[in-house]
C-alpha cells in the first residue's frame, strides 16, 4: 500500500472475465468534480463559472460537516475524502443512511422545501469540499437549468438507493445484504491498493449500514477472509475477489 493516498479520488470497480476466472479493475477518477453528476451535461466553461462561485473547505477526521436539525445554509460537494450521513434514534443509536465519496453532494441540494437538515454529515477521514451559499446556488440554478435538473436527479437516485437497501433488509439474509453493500461501497468510497480495492470502514459501521449486529458482520468477514474473498482488518475491508463477492449476493 506504499504511496496510496487515504481517501483519494473515487474508484470505478467492475468485474472482467478472464480465461480462467474473473478479476476486477479499478479506475481512479482524476477529477471528481468534473465527473460529479451535479455537472452532468454542463459545458466545461459553465462548470468553471459555477465552481468559481464556491469556496473551498477542509475537514479533519470525524469533523461534523452539518448537523441534523441545523438550517440549510450551504450546498456541499465533496471533492476528496469520505463522509457518512447518519440519523440518531430516540434511544441514541446511530443509523448510517449512506456513505458519500468524491463528487457526491452532501445533505440537501436546495433549501426551498427543506429549511433544515434531516441528517448529520461527518467526515470519516481528512476531506475537502466545495461550498455554495444556498442563495448563490439557487441563483446559479436559475441561470443554468441543467444544474437544477441534476440536483433533482441526485435526490431521485438517493431515494432509489434507500428503497433498494430497504428491500434488501426486508427480504434478504444478512450475508447477501453485506455483500451487496460492500460492492456498492467500492464505487462510492473505495480506493485501489495492492491486491484489491479497500473500504476504510469499521465493522460496526458496516453493521449499521445493513441493520445487523457487529458480531454477525465480524463472523461473515472472518469466513470470507479465510476463503480469500476479502482481507478484513479492524477499520477496513479490502476486496480481493470481486466476482466471488458478487456470487455470494446472488446465491442467497
Image: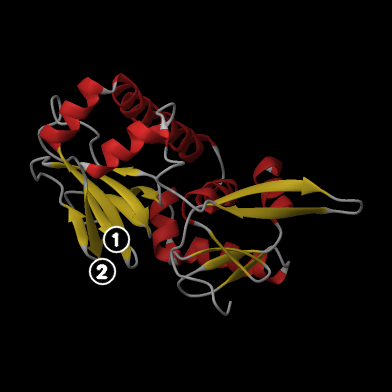
| One can see residue 232 in this view | yes
Instruction: Depth check: give the residue in front, 33 or 185.
Output: 33
Within-10-Å neighbours for mark 2: few <14, some 14–19, many 20+: some
Q: Position of residue 8 (x, y in %)?
A: 46, 62
Vertical arrangement, residue 121 with respect to residue 201, above or below: above
Vertical arrangement, residue 73 with respect to residue 61, above or below: above
Mark 1 highlights which residue?
123
Q: Position of residue 34 (x, y in %)?
A: 43, 42
Image-based side of 212 in relation to 123, left or right: right
Q: Position of residue 209 (x, y in %)?
A: 41, 51
Q: Residue at x 23, y 36 (%)?
A: 108
Pick out the residue farthest to the right.
19
Q: Residue at x 26, y 69 (%)?
A: 60
Is label 1 in contact with label 2 (beta carbons under 8 Å)? yes
Mark 2 highlights which residue?
60
Within-10-Å neighbours for mark 1: few <14, some 14–19, many 20+: many
Q: CA distance from mark 1 to mark 2?
A: 7 Å
Q: Position of residue 227 (x, y in %)?
A: 73, 66
| One can see residue 88 in this view | no
Q: Residue at x 10, y 44 (%)?
A: 69
Quadrant in the picture for residue 25: bottom right
Amino acid at each position: 500500500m506504499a504511496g496510496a493516498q487515504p481517501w483519494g479520488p473515487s474508484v470505478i470497480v467492475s468485474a472482467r472475465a478472464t480465461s480462467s476466472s474473473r478479476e476486477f479493475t479499478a479506475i481512479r477518477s482524476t477529477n471528481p468534480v468534473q465527473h460529479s453528476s451535479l455537472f452532468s451535461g454542463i459545458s466545461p466553461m459553465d462548470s468553471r463559472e459555477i465552481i468559481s462561485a464556491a469556496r473551498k473547505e477542509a475537514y479533519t477526521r470525524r469533523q461534523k460537516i452539518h448537523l441534523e436539525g441545523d438550517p440549510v445554509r450551504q450546498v456541499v460537494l465533496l471533492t476528496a475524502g469520505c463522509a457518512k450521513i447518519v440519523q440518531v434514534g430516540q434511544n441514541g443509536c446511530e443509523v448510517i443512511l449512506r456513505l458519500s465519496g468524491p463528487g457526491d453532494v452532501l445533505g440537501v441540494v436546495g433549501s426551498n422545501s427543506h429549511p433544515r437538515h434531516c441528517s448529520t454529515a461527518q467526515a470519516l477521514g481528512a476531506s475537502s469540499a466545495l461550498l455554495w451559499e444556498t442563495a448563490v446556488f439557487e441563483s446559479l440554478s436559475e441561470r443554468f437549468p441543467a444544474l437544477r435538473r441534476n440536483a433533482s436527479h441526485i435526490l431521485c437516485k438517493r431515494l432509489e438507493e434507500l428503497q433498494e437497501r430497504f428491500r434488501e433488509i426486508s427480504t434478504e439474509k444478512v450475508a447477501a445484504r453485506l455483500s451487496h453493500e460492500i460492492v456498492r461501497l467500492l464505487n462510492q468510497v473505495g480506493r485501489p491498493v495492492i491486491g484489491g480495492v479497500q473500504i476504510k470502514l469499521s465493522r460496526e459501521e458496516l453493521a449499521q449500514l445493513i441493520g445487523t449486529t457487529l458480531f454477525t458482520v465480524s463472523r461473515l468477514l472472518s469466513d470470507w477472509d479465510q476463503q480469500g474473498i476479502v482481507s478484513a482488518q479492524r477499520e477496513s475491508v479490502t476486496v480481493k475477489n470481486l466476482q466471488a463477492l458478487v456470487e455470494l449476493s446472488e446465491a442467497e
